[in-house]
Image (cartoon, helix red, strand yellow):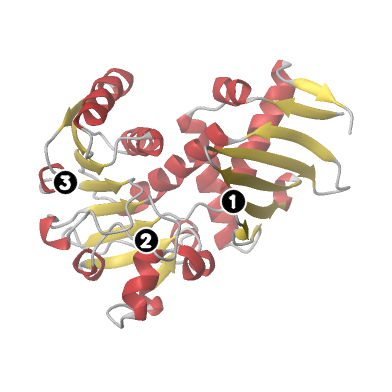
């Protein structure tokens, strides 16, 4: 029987420490060529879009794919987990929370490997759903004392600061500009839906690490050319996928001010094939795309623990 899990089931099972461990393990296997990831495929129709993301984690016996449809006024996320030995559909789960947590975890893994060990100060641009898991993941891998948040809506950043301060036991403050959020930050997070840069390289302090999260569109970017070119080490969770949809990289490369040769795989860093930061004053950058393998790793763990705890509903396909 196939196990059906709702958003609330997933939320009750999945914690950020688990997501961090699982995503790091999956990326290590990808770097060791023991896992398979395929770029996001998009099917556009006049009123919306269907996105499909498949991957395989054979060491754990799983294949899976996430798909989500974006039609006004909402986007719906689903994840299917299959047995890699016989193709049986093991689980179908709603996957909005799953995606939020694994996206935060990928940035947390990048921060673990790239940010300065003594990083204590976060600047975050954006105060939405994704920003929450981004800050949670960073706080799980570094001893953060203060986080400054900017969003265009003053009420949103005020709410974000209050809720995240209470949740993380960290001093989170809303500030009045992106520059104020970033100018003293050891770790910078951009989690917006902007099509134009919200982060300027001139604002960055020496030794900063950047998690650039908001856009997975070829025509949108969150960081300017200066921020990109100040970065001594740049990586993505999939360079293949970045070439299709990472406007933060595609747009400056098309204009000849950056090159794909400078973009590395996060998996190669995690697996030890690459060194990241080589100097305390280096600026480093992780361009988050969001890959299917992260969904499979986290979704498989959710399925296993749902079975153990008797959570979810069995359905016959």
- State the SS at label 2: loop
Residue receiving disc 3: 178
- Mark 3 neighbour class, 10 Å CA radius: few under 14, some 14 to 19, many 20 or more: many
Measured Cα–Cα span from mark 1 to mark 2:
20 Å
| Of pointers 3 and 1, the one earlier in the residue sequence | 1
> Residue 81: which quarter of the image?
top right
Q: Residue at x 45, y 57 (%)?
A: 216
| Of pointers 3 and 2, the one earlier in the residue sequence | 3
The quarter of the image holding the C terminus is: top right
**Does residue 216 lie above or below 95 as drawn?**
below
The quarter of the image holding the N terminus is: top right
Q: Residue furthest front?
A: 46
Q: Position of residue 311 (x, y in %)?
A: 70, 18
Residue receiving disc 2: 220
Q: Is residue 254 left or right of residue 289?
A: left
Q: Nearer the viewer, mark 1 or mark 2?
A: 1
Of residues 128 and 238, which is closer to you in this image?
128
Q: Position of residue 47 (x, y in %)?
A: 59, 51
Q: Position of residue 202 (x, y in %)?
A: 11, 61
Q: Residue at x 28, y 17 (%)?
A: 166
Is residue 118 visible from the viewing direction of this image?
Answer: yes
- Mark 2 neighbour class, 10 Å CA radius: few under 14, some 14 to 19, many 20 or more: many
- Mark 1 neighbour class, 10 Å CA radius: few under 14, some 14 to 19, many 20 or more: few
| Of pointers 1 and 2, the one earlier in the residue sequence | 1
- State the SS at label 1: loop
Q: Residue at x 33, y 60 (%)?
A: 221
Residue receiving disc 1: 47
Is residue 275 visible from the viewing direction of this image?
Answer: no
């Amino acid at each position: 029987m196939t196990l059906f899990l709702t958003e609330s089931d997933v939320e009750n099972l999945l914690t950020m420490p688990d997501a961090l461990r699982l995503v790091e393990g999956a990326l290590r296997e990808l770097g060791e060529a023991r896992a398979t990831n395929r770029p996001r495929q998009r099917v556009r129709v006049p009123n919306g879009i269907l996105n499909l993301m498949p991957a395989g984690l054979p060491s754990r016996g799983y294949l899976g794919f996430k798909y989500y449809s974006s039609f006004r006024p909402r986007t719906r996320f689903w994840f299917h987990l299959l047995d890699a030995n016989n193709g049986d559909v093991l689980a179908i789960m709603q996957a909005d929370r799953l995606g939020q947590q694994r996206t935060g975890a990928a940035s947390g893994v990048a921060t673990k490997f790239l940010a300065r060990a003594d990083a204590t100060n976060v600047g975050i641009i954006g105060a939405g759903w994704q920003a929450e898991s981004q800050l949670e993941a960073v706080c799980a891998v570094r001893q953060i004392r203060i986080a400054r948040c900017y969003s265009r809506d003053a009420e949103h950043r005020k709410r974000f600061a209050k809720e995240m301060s209470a949740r993380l036991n960290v001093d989170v403050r809303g500030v009045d500009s992106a520059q104020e959020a970033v100018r003293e930050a050891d770790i910078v997070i951009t989690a917006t839906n902007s099509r134009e840069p919200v982060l300027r390289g001139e604002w960055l302090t020496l030794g900063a690490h950047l998690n650039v999260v908001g856009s997975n569109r070829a025509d949108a970017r969150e960081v300017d050319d200066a921020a990109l070119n100040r970065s001594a080490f740049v990586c993505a969770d999939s360079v293949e996928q970045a070439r299709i949809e990472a406007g933060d990289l595609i747009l400056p490369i098309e204009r000849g001010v950056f090159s794909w040769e400078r973009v590395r795989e996060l998996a190669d860093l995690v697996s030890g094939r690459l060194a990241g930061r080589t100097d305390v004053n280096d600026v480093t950058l992780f361009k988050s795309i969001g890959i299917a393998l992260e969904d499979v790793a986290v979704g498989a763990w959710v399925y296993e623990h749902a079975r153990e705890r008797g959570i979810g509903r069995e359905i016959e396909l």
